[in-house]
């Protein structure tokens, strides 16, 4: 079963990525879920492709996915109830949580995609009995497939990857992101960013949390932090970073799970210094 999970998850990510690559240069039909939170027709198309493939292969699995339906084009969204114990997060499954579920972001980096900025991906994770077992993230423009299974390491296009060996904060390149409710968090967000800018070699804000986590995993950046992410933003990346030798906690050093209010991912060597800066 683990091999089949990886195979189908990989196929679903590649299929969704092909749609993104095809639609990227075209005009987009954009609606807003929030003040600065857009969704495009491609988000819905990719999610439908992913769900169809996963349902056919694993009809008894559950799903937690970002987009809830296709209201934009007049279709009714599927019935969904709040996930048990997680108010406000709809999930598509039986009232009783299944043993296995897939956590899906069909297009991470929608703002980038909508503007033609080439930094976006598809992110798919599989959880069994509450534990993340598999994650795959595909960047269709660079044709980069990041993948990991628990206990077997992480890879990029089939080749093993590891986090960086940087051990000095002033030599570290750090990634970050700004939450969709940034307008309510400007003072504390800027203060935190200022401390990072003062203590590190540089900070990058590319607009895709899933790819930021992949870049930690393969050593392109030495750390990543952000607030107010959703489960589908980090589930696959959590598997990939940890399997690549990285460390992930919250800003106060507590263990991270996909419902935590903030995330710090690092190459492990810099973690305590990054926590101090946060």
Image (cartoon, rainbow, N blue to C red):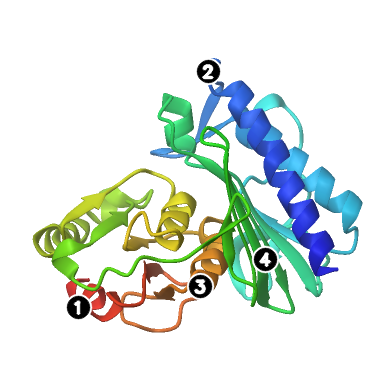
| Outermost residue, front side | 159
Which mark, by number, is residue 242?
A: 3
Of the image marks 2 and 3, the number of the one nearer the N terminus: 2
Tell me the distance, in whole angstroms, between the alpha carbons under discs 3 and 4: 11 Å
Which mark, by number, is residue 147?
A: none
Looking at the image, residue 207 sits to the left or right of residue 235; the answer is left
Mark 3 crowdedness (10 Å alpha carbons): few <14, some 14-19, many ≥20: many
User: Residue at horizontal 36%, vertical 52%?
Assistant: 179
Contact (CB < 8 A) between labels 4 and 2? no
Tell me the distance, in whole angstroms, between the alpha carbons under discs 1 and 4: 31 Å
Of the image marks 3 and 1, the number of the one nearer the N terminus: 3
Mark 2 crowdedness (10 Å alpha carbons): few <14, some 14-19, many ≥20: few
Of the image marks 1 and 4, the number of the one nearer the N terminus: 4
Tell me the distance, in whole angstroms, between the alpha carbons under discs 2 and 3: 34 Å
Mark 3 falls on what kind of element? helix
Q: Position of residue 38 (x, y in %)?
A: 48, 35
Mark 1 falls on what kind of element? helix
Looking at the image, residue 253 sits to the left or right of residue 33; the answer is left
Mark 2 falls on what kind of element? loop
Camera-nearest label, 1 or 4: 4
> Residue 69: in sight, yes or no?
no
Of the image marks 4 and 2, the number of the one nearer the N terminus: 2
113 is higher (above) or lower (below) than 87: above
Which mark, by number, is residue 276?
A: 1
**What residue did someone put label 4 on?**
134
Image quarter of residue 271:
bottom left
> Residue 251: in sight, yes or no?
yes
- Locate the N terminus and report the quarter of the image it occupies: bottom right
Tell me the distance, in whole angstroms, between the alpha carbons under discs 2 and 1: 42 Å
Along the viewing direction, whichever of 62 and 87 lies nearer the viewer:
62
**What residue did someone put label 2 on?**
25
Mark 1 crowdedness (10 Å alpha carbons): few <14, some 14-19, many ≥20: few
């Amino acid at each position: 079963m683990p091999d089949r999970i990886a195979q189908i998850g990989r196929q679903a990510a590649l299929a969704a990525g092909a749609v993104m690559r095809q639609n990227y240069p075209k005009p987009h039909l954009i609606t807003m879920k929030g003040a600065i939170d857009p969704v495009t027709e491609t988000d819905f198309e990719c999610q439908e492709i992913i769900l169809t493939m996963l349902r056919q292969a694993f009809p008894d699995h559950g799903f937690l996915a970002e987009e809830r339906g296709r209201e934009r084009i007049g279709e009714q969204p599927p019935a969904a109830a709040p996930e048990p114990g997680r108010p406000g997060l709809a999930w598509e499954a039986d009232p009783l949580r299944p043993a296995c579920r897939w956590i899906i972001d069909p297009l991470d980096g929608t703002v980038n995609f909508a503007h033609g900025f080439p930094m976006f991906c598809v992110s798919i994770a599989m959880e069994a009995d509450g534990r993340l077992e598999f994650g795959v993230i595909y960047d269709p423009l660079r044709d980069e497939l990041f993948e990991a299974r628990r206990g077997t390491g992480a890879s990029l296009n089939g080749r093993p990857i590891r986090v960086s060996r940087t051990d000095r904060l002033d030599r570290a390149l750090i990634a970050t992101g700004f939450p969709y409710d940034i307008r309510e968090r400007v003072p504390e967000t800027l203060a935190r960013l200022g401390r990072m800018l003062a203590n590190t070699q540089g900070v990058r804000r590319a607009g895709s949390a899933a790819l930021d986590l992949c870049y930690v995993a393969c050593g392109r950046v030495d750390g990543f932090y952000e607030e107010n992410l959703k489960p589908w933003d980090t589930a696959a990346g959590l598997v990939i970073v940890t399997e690549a030798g990285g460390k992930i906690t919250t800003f106060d050093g507590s263990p991270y799970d996909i419902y935590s209010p903030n995330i710090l991912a690092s190459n492990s060597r810099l973690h305590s210094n990054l926590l101090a800066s946060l």
